[in-house]
Image: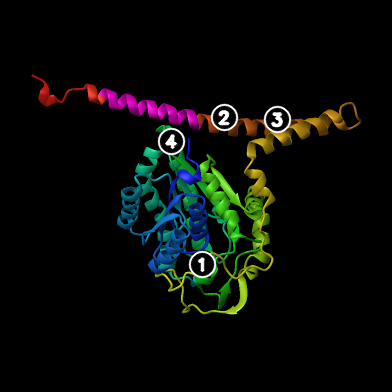
Amino acid sequence: MSRPIEQQVIVITGASSGIGLATAQVAARLGAKVALAARNARDLDRAVDEITRAGAQAVSVPTDVTDLEQVEGLAEAVVERWGRIDTWVNNAAVSAYARFSEQPLEDFRRLLEVNFMGQVHGARAALPHLERSDGALICVGSALSDRGVPLLGAYSASKHALKGWLDSLRTELDHEGSGVRVTLVKPSSINTPFFNKAKTQLGVMPRPIPPVYDVKLAVDAILRAAEGDVRDVYVGGAGKALAIAERVSPKLVDLHQLRNGLERQHTDWPKDADAPHNLYEPLEDDGGRTGDFVRGMHRHSVSQTVASHAVLASWTGAALLAAVAAALDGRRFGGPIKSLLGVGAVALFGKATLELATSLRHRNGKRSADGRRKAVRSETAAVRPLSAVP
């Protein structure tokens, strides 16, 4: 079983601003020991100073996630200080806005190195420690893990790659009987300084695609994953709606993006391609927790609240559909509708049961894995070394 947040040691990359900083602050306030990692050492130290002055425990470890040695050093520093790692949050990311025909290939490659390989490096460094603690590997992807959008081709590609790799990794870990929980968090547009720091070839500063959500919703999703066993988490209903629309009709989404996808990513604030950005080097000031898009920002998400109680919501939905189907019994034209409602009720009940069974299987799998590890250690101890054989 996972530890409650207040008992955890948590590592967060990309923790000098935005989602990473907000998550570190809330986790520390709840009692977790938190390691903050990013390229901007000054902002990391400032954040850690604020956390420790409030009586919580935190440490800053300046880290460039594109350098595997630095990421491994981060893991080793945390284990040396606190003895273990319970949750590792891969959150570091950069962005660049441009049409593909106008974007330098070195920018495209850099996005993949940071956003995708940075998370691969995080997993490679963290997994040996998470295996020992039955911990959580949480990777912050995007709603664009499911559907790419114009002007963000490289960013979308990096988030698609992340999803595909995690699908593979998760199955391999399950096959090995691992107790590590792997979660992909898919934020919709979140109001952070991420957009202020992006490189842009649009002639103006970019903006998040509306609707825009409060960063606290992303924090809630990450900390819920740290304590639970959830495969994918959408932050904000817009991302979930985009994923559903993509499954139903990709061509309709193409049409919607053609009509709305480009203009809605432009602000009226002039900014040229030579303006300061953090694609290759950190900025002097990472901007703190929130960005400039407070107006119209959504502070709550009904879909996210429902998803946080997935089993109960599915069972409730199944019961309601079954009740409506029963009420239609004997009514004219009620037969076909009743059948459809019945199918829906069975589907929802099956979904809830599968989610519950998966959770229980995960817990039992961790117990079995622990038993196998103990058995292997016992067998190894019972075998005499060859040098001792007469």
Query: Who's the residue at 73% across and 36% down the image?
Result: 317
Magenta stretch prevailing secondary structure? helix
Q: Nearer the viewer, residue 390 or 248?
A: 390
Does the rendering let one see residue 348?
Answer: yes
Foreground mark, 1 or 3, reads 1
Residue 346 is marked as 3
Q: CA distance from mark 1 to mark 3?
A: 47 Å
Residue 179: assigned label: 4
Q: Which residue is mark 1?
A: 288
Could you tell me which secondary element the residue under label 4 belongs to? loop
Q: Position of residue 333 (x, y in %)?
A: 89, 32
Of mark 4 and mark 2, the one earlier in the sequence is 4
| Residue 141 on image: x %, y % | 51, 54
Q: Secondary structure at mark 2?
A: helix
Q: Mark 2 or 3 closer to N-term? A: 3
Vertical side of 339 occupied by 200: above or below? below
- What label does residue 357 carry, if any? 2
Q: CA distance from mark 1 to mark 4?
A: 35 Å
Report how far apart the C-alphas of labels 3 and 4 lie in the structure: 31 Å
Amino acid on which the number 4 mark rests in the picture: Gly
Please give the count of numbered marks on the rendered protein. Answer: 4
Q: Is residue 338 above or below residue 389?
A: below
SS type, badge 1: loop
Q: Amino acid at mark 2?
A: Ala
Quadrant hosting residue 83: top left
- In magenta, the rendered stretch is 362-379
Is residue 378 on the magenta stretch?
yes
The residue closer to the viewer here, 297 or 340, is 297
